Image (spheres, rainbow, N blue to C red):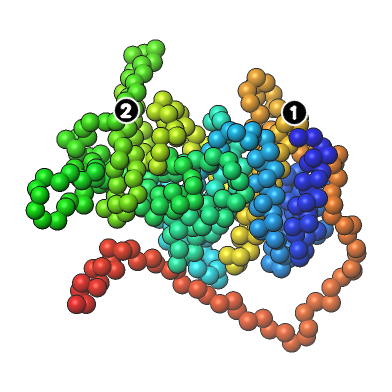
Amino acid sequence: MNLNTLKTFRQQVYDCMERRGDALFSLCDGLLSEPQARSLPELSHSPLFERQWPSIYAALADGKIHVDQLQALCVRSVLEEIPADAVVWIAVDATPEERPDAQTSEDRGYIHVSNLPLADKPISIGWMFSVVGLLPEQASSWVPPLDIQRISSEQTAVGVAIDQLRQLKPLFGIRRVIVVADRWYGTPEMLRACHELGYSVLIRLKSNRKLYRKPVRRFKLGRPPQDGPLLQGTRPETQFDPSATWQTTDQEDRVTRVSRFDEVHFQQDRDLILSVIRVERTSARGTKRDPRVSWFLTLDDVVPLEQVPQRYSLRFSEEHLFRFLKQDLLWLRARVRTPEQFVRWSWIVALAFTQLYLARPLGLQALLPWEAKGRPVTPRQIRRVMPTILSQVGTPVRACRPRGKASGRAKGFHPKPATRYPVIYKTSNKEKKGKTTAST
């Protein structure tokens, strides 16, 4: 990556913005070059944003981005740094966006918010977003987002993740891609979709999920059994005869043992053959966040047993991405009304991070006096030098044309109050079955 390549990338990004492209592109440059801003109007103070602050929300309200073209451009640019024969590791996860007081925003629902202070239940009101990111080889915040979609009240996180993986599949080409996800994605629907799309997976499994081995017929008469012996993480008596085992000991005599159980299946999809991996760590604290025994699902043995703990731990790098997008790139600070406007802002934030990722190999960084020089560079350090980089590559945005003062509202104009929308409560499958039973 050099300055000419970055300049070409920015020109192609500008071509993806169909309406109000100048203001949208300048908003992204202002986000990259104004780290002191704490709100969207403060981004207009950036020297790279030559417009007035009302242009920011006008661009988010009326702008239009060719999302498919922009996504293909970002994925292609990010994958250029990875060898063609290397395995691509991606992570999919959902993150909340709180909007408890935005009564004029449509399709808000109840969301789970982790680490919510001074609350008995970590529940709030807002939107949920599903993000697919490219995992790094080493734990860091460098997880460029490949796709961002909002999870509507009529959708589920698993369904949106399947749609995202289906859209990204042609962009990966013939590369081998492994999907890493948390235990909420360990469902038969998700695994079946990954199998049909050609993805390998490393998905965490809930310890109480029931899987079954190959059926064994004991009697000649009668219907042959559809399920074999049970395999469940919470029942040690069902965990026998692993197909493969790997074990290691660190310098403090702490043991890590990885076992694989092949040819198991869910009752909901008996034709899909899976492998279950059990990871036992004596060094763990035995808490919910750091359990001593963890369970994972795979579709094949493409991931060696000795790499399972380290590879899955890289999934938490996406959590660092969420923190950087929300705290530094002001992802949650956009006070827009409609979900479409917030999705548009989300792609601007993702585009800003992608440019930071592409500018990383340039070797430019700004360190504070207390930051060590020998450590890997971080997105925040690259962002400090982005004004210098952007001044060298230039901008494809057209110069502003002064229009004078607006005439204002007509005399006698009375704006109508915005429509208020209720909070949507999702009914779980158990509640639906209970209502159906009660009605009958």
- Please tell me the numbered disc located at residue 47: none
First in sequence: mark 1 or mark 2? 2
Quarter of the image for residue 360 reads top right
Say which residue appears at 74% left-offset and 87% top-offset. 412
Front: mark 1 or 2: 2
Give the secondary structure at mark 2. Answer: strand
Q: Residue at x 50, y 40 (%)?
A: 178
Q: Nearer the viewer, residue 226 or 183?
A: 226
Label 1: few (<14), some or many (≥20) within 10 Å? few
Which image quarter: residue 243? top left
Query: Residue 376: x, y in percent?
Result: 63, 26
| Residue type at tag 1 | Gly
Picture quarter with the N terminus:
top right
* 10 Å crowding of disc 2: few (<14), some (14-19), many (20+): few
**Position of 322 relative to 370 (above/below):** below
In the picture, the disc for residue 363 is 1
Residue 245 lies left or right of residue 12; in this view the side is left
Where does residue 203 sit, x and y in percent of width and height? 41, 42
Q: Quadrant of residue 61 in the image?
A: bottom right
Q: Amino acid at mark 2?
A: Ala
Q: Residue at x 30, y 40 (%)?
A: 263
Task: List the residue tagged with mark 2.
Answer: 244
Which quarter of the image is occupied by the C terminus? bottom left
Q: Is residue 303 visible?
A: yes
The residues bearing labels 1 and 2 have C-alpha atoms spaced at a distance of: 44 Å
